[in-house]
Amino acid sequence: MESDKILVAAGLTAAAVVGAFVFWGPATNTSGRGRLAGLINLGKTCFLNAVLHALAACPQFIAWLEKDRSTRETSLRNTLATVLSVVNGTNKALKECVAPIAVINALKRLGWVIPSDEQDAHELLNVLLATLEEETHKKTRKVS
């Protein structure tokens, strides 16, 4: 019986602590930084949204994108950096939802054809990384 009373007291104490934390815990950040924006599914772009969310969760990749942004606004690198900053909530023009059409358009400008029935996230990731590699090598060759 004594152990039951201790168990009930411990449970009530834990509930009180959790309740106090919920009501009086740390303040939420109201500046918008760190809020995650949703990605709109433009028909069958959930595979693209999955890749963008995965890349947005890679701080080293984001830092690399931001490090030497191209002077060409139409580059895939600039486009990805902008879209991922909106997804991560670090863009000053924070929106609740963002359409990933800019990434699709950047790939189309670079000659990629993305069929409307495309659904392979792994294939798209390979396309994105190969295109970024090509852009990086072109930039390196121009500097050399």
Image (tube, helix red, strand yellow):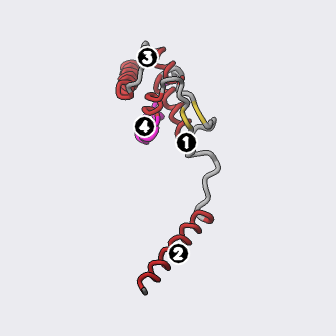
- For marks 1 and 2, the one nearer the N-term is 2
Choose mark 2 or mark 4, whichever is in front. Answer: 2
Q: Amino acid at mark 2?
A: Leu
Left or right: 96 with respect to 2? right
Residue occupied by mark 4? 54
Magenta stretch in the rendered image: 53-71
Q: Does the CB distance between marks 1 and 2 fall below 8 Å?
A: no
Q: Rounded to the nearest whole Å, what is the CA distance between mark 3 and mark 2?
A: 57 Å
- For marks 4 and 3, the one nearer the N-term is 4
Q: Residue at x 47, y 83 (%)?
A: 5
Decide if residue 20 is in sight here: yes
Q: Rounded to the nearest whole Å, what is the CA distance between mark 2 and mark 4?
A: 40 Å
Can residue 61 be found in the magenta stretch?
yes
- What label sits on residue 36 in the rendered view? 1
Depth order, front residue of 117/140: 117
Q: Amino acid at mark 4?
A: Ala
Left or right: 114 with respect to 38? left
Residue occupied by mark 2? 12
Q: Rounded to the nearest whole Å, what is the CA distance between mark 4 and mark 3?
A: 20 Å
Choose mark 1 or mark 2, whichever is in front. Answer: 2
- For marks 4 and 1, the one nearer the N-term is 1
Q: Amino acid at mark 1?
A: Leu
Q: Amino acid at mark 3?
A: Ile
- For marks 3 and 2, the one nearer the N-term is 2
- For marks 1 and 3, the one nearer the N-term is 1
Q: Rounded to the nearest whole Å, what is the CA distance between mark 1 and mark 3?
A: 26 Å
Q: Position of residue 89 (x, y in %)?
A: 56, 41
The kind of secondary structure element at disc 2 is helix
Q: Position of residue 139 (x, y in %)?
A: 41, 21
Q: Residue at x 55, y 46 (%)?
A: 34
Q: Rounded to the nearest whole Å, what is the CA distance between mark 4 and mark 1?
A: 13 Å
